[in-house]
Image (cartoon, rainbow, N blue to C red):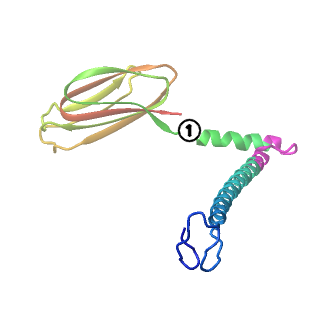
Amino acid sequence: MKCSKCGFENKNTAKFCSKCGNSLEAKPEIEKNNNNSKIIIVALVIIILILAVSIGYFALNNNSNVSNQVQSASQSQQAPSSSGESSQQTTSSEPAKESKEWKLIGTYSGSGSGSQSINVPAGQIMVKISAYPIKNYATNHLYVTGSNGQSAGVDWGSNSAVETRSDSVSYTSSSPQTFTIDYYETVSWQVEFYRYQ
């Protein structure tokens, strides 16, 4: 067995170096040190994990408290006071009117010649049309006519420029209407129906 201090080669059964007297049984201490290092590393990893979980928990709790405060503040702003209840109701009904807008309820398009019928629901309706002709014939057209008499249309004469043309019409009806789309010699056409809601 080689001495770790002086390097002298001793017998395998020797407990002390026969040259310098150094103990040859020092290896178990090194193993103990290695085991101690492993225990320290595991303990540090566990402490880091506990810290990470704690920070995450407190961060989530803090966000929850902030959102609850914001929510309660917005609810307290919306809650009407007993003295001004009627004025609050008047104010809250006005934004509902302002929130209405024209919403697209149907789009139809095509090319060439033909016709088709479209059912349109009741309400305040706007119809927008546009078309592009094949050539400037006297008969190129796109007409949209409703069962209530409302209509929009574009056409081209023989001397008209070959260009896109548009038109629109709006009306209010308490019952559904049927519209006929009639088109002739078009490269492309489009009809859009909007309802104010």
Residue lying at 18% horizontally and 33% vertically, measured from the top left = 186
Q: Position of residue 192 (x, y in %)?
A: 36, 33
Q: Could you say which is closer to the camera, residue 141 or residue 39?
A: 39
Task: Answer whether residue 74 is magenta in the image.
Answer: yes
Q: Which residues are magenta?
A: 72-86
Task: Answer whether residue 187 is magenta in the image.
Answer: no
Q: Position of residue 76 (x, y in %)?
A: 79, 47
Q: Quadrant of residue 23?
A: bottom right
Q: Quadrant of residue 14?
A: bottom right
* In this view, 78 is above or below 121: below
Mark 1, secondary structure of its residue: loop
Check the picture and name the quadrant holding the N terminus: bottom right
- Residue 154 showing in the rendered view: no
Is 21 situated left or right of 111 in this image?
right
* In this view, 178 is above or below 64: above
Q: Could you say which is closer to the camera, residue 55 or residue 12?
A: 12
* In this view, 184 is above or below 92: above
- Residue 87 showing in the rendered view: yes
The residue singled out by tag 1 in the image is 100
Please state which amino acid type lies under the numbered disc 1.
Answer: Lys
Residue lying at 80% horizontally and 40% vertically, measured from the top left = 86
Q: Position of residue 20 (x, y in %)?
A: 62, 80
